[in-house]
Image (spheres, helix red, strand yellow):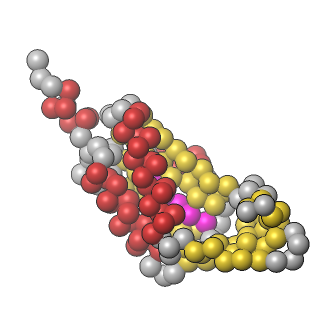
Amino acid sequence: MASTNDHPGERATQDPVKLIGIRETPLSVDEVFRAVGDDAAGGTALFVGTVRNHDGGADVDALGYSCHPSAEAEMRRIAEKVAAEYPVRALAAVHRVGDLRVGDLAVVVAVSCPHRGEAFDACRKLIDDLKHEVPIWKHQRFSDGTEEWVGAC
């Protein structure tokens, strides 16, 4: 009997990066989830980052995201790196820019792999690396009238 790793479904696909984008319009969890659908994937992990109403002990009223023109290319580079490190069947990541309100979706990423553990690990690596390396900046406006810029990298 052949090892389960010999089955093509256990390996990464040729081009697993299905969707990468920087959007000025509201994000769709359904779009990202559909993009990573794969019959050979036994596990799909999805992360949704939302605008919360507080940060560092201060109430947040609103925020805006802006990015460097290279942000989407950097997202793709990171996605390809994650796909090379894990047996990714499909991967997708979208990030919002512009003015957002509390509760809005800021980022949605998803990864499908043959097994759940791989999907969780790859999804965690994807969102962590995106937050640390992609040139996207957050401008937070607080209820007390103060504001701050938070850099992603």
* Residue 95 is inside the magenta segment: yes
Residue sitting nearer the eye, 19 or 134: 134
Residue sitting nearer the eye, 149 or 24: 149
Left or right, 64 with reference to 92:
right
Q: Tell me the quarter of the picture where residue 9 sits.
A: top left
Residue 57 spot, x, y in % from top left: 78, 61
Residue lying at 24% horizontally and 40% vertically, measured from the top left = 11
Rendered view: 24 above or below 118: below
Left or right, 16 with reference to 67:
left
Residue lying at 44% horizontally and 79% vertically, measured from the top left = 70
* Residue 106 is inside the magenta segment: no
Rendered view: 152 above or below 29: below
State the residue lying farthest toward the bottom.
Answer: 69
Q: Is residue 128 visible?
A: yes
Residue 42 spot, x, y in % from top left: 38, 31
Residue lying at 11% horizontally and 17% vertically, measured from the top left = 1
Q: How many marks?
A: 0
Q: Main secondary structure of the magenta part?
A: strand
| Region of the chain picked out in magenta, as a range | 92-96
Residue lying at 26% horizontally and 47% vertically, measured from the top left = 13
Residue 82 spot, x, y in % from top left: 34, 55
State the residue lying farthest toward the right.
Answer: 144
Left or right, 115 with reference to 33:
left
Q: Can residue 21 be seen in this view?
A: no
State the residue lying farthest toward the left.
Answer: 1
State the residue lying farthest toward the top.
Answer: 1
Rendered view: 47 above or below 72: above
Residue 31 spot, x, y in % from top left: 55, 50
